[in-house]
Image: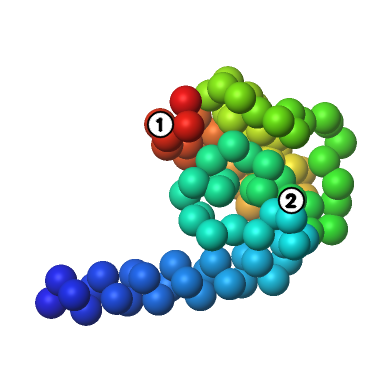
């Protein structure tokens, strides 16, 4: 039973990763959804591609600390909110980050 759920989750992650990479430039391909979206850079890149809009504010292209990660993720969520495609009232950048790379 556990193996079946694990394989299904693995398959879903693979499919979603492939879909994400279809929108990403070669230098920003995703291999691990959790780790690669953690700093917000690839998330911004993906959302710019999906919404067709460029982020108006400058973001930290070389984030080093958790504060930079949170700021980038926050800006990505604001881009998504401004596109009118999703309501972001119930979640924020801080809750979406893991504690890796801090």
Q: Quadrant of the N terminus?
A: bottom left
In this rendering, position of residue 17 left or right of residue 43: left
Element marked by disc 2: helix
State the image quarter where residue 67 is shown.
Answer: top right
Image color mode = rainbow
Comes first in the chain, label 1 or label 2: 2
Q: Residue at x 82, y 41 (%)?
A: 55
Image vertical order of residue 46 relative to residue 71, above or below: below
Query: Around disc 2, counting alpha carbons within 10 Å, would you say few (fewer than 14), some (14 to 19), or many (20 or more)?
Result: some
Who's the residue at 75% across and 33% down the image? 61
Image check: 90 left or right of 75?
left
Q: Which mark is residue 45?
A: 2
Taking depth in this image into account, of 82 and 39 the one nearest to the observer is 39
Q: Secondary structure at mark 1?
A: loop
| Rendered view: 50 above or below 36 | below
**Crowd band around label 1 with a 10 angstrom C-alpha radius: few (<14), some (14–19), many (20+):** few
Task: Name the residue rendered at 70%, 54% in the picture.
Answer: 28
Residue at image point 53% right, 24% down: 66
Q: Whole-percent x and y of residue 37?
A: 57, 46
Outermost residue toward the front?
Answer: 27
The residue labelled by disc 1 is 99
Q: Is residue 87 above or below residue 73?
A: below
Residue 72 seen from this side: yes
As drawn, the label of residue 75 is: none
The residue lying toward the viewer, choosing from 62 and 81, is 62
């Amino acid at each position: 039973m556990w193996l079946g759920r694990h394989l299904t989750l693995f398959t879903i992650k693979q499919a979603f990763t492939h879909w994400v990479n279809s929108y990403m430039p070669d230098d920003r391909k995703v291999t691990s959804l959790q780790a690669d979206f953690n700093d917000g850079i690839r998330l911004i890149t993906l959302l710019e591609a999906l919404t067709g809009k460029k982020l108006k504010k400058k973001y930290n292209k070389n984030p080093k600390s958790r504060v930079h990660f949170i700021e980038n993720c926050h800006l990505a969520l604001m881009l998504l909110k401004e596109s009118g495609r999703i309501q972001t009232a119930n979640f924020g950048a801080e809750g979406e980050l893991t504690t890796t790379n801090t």
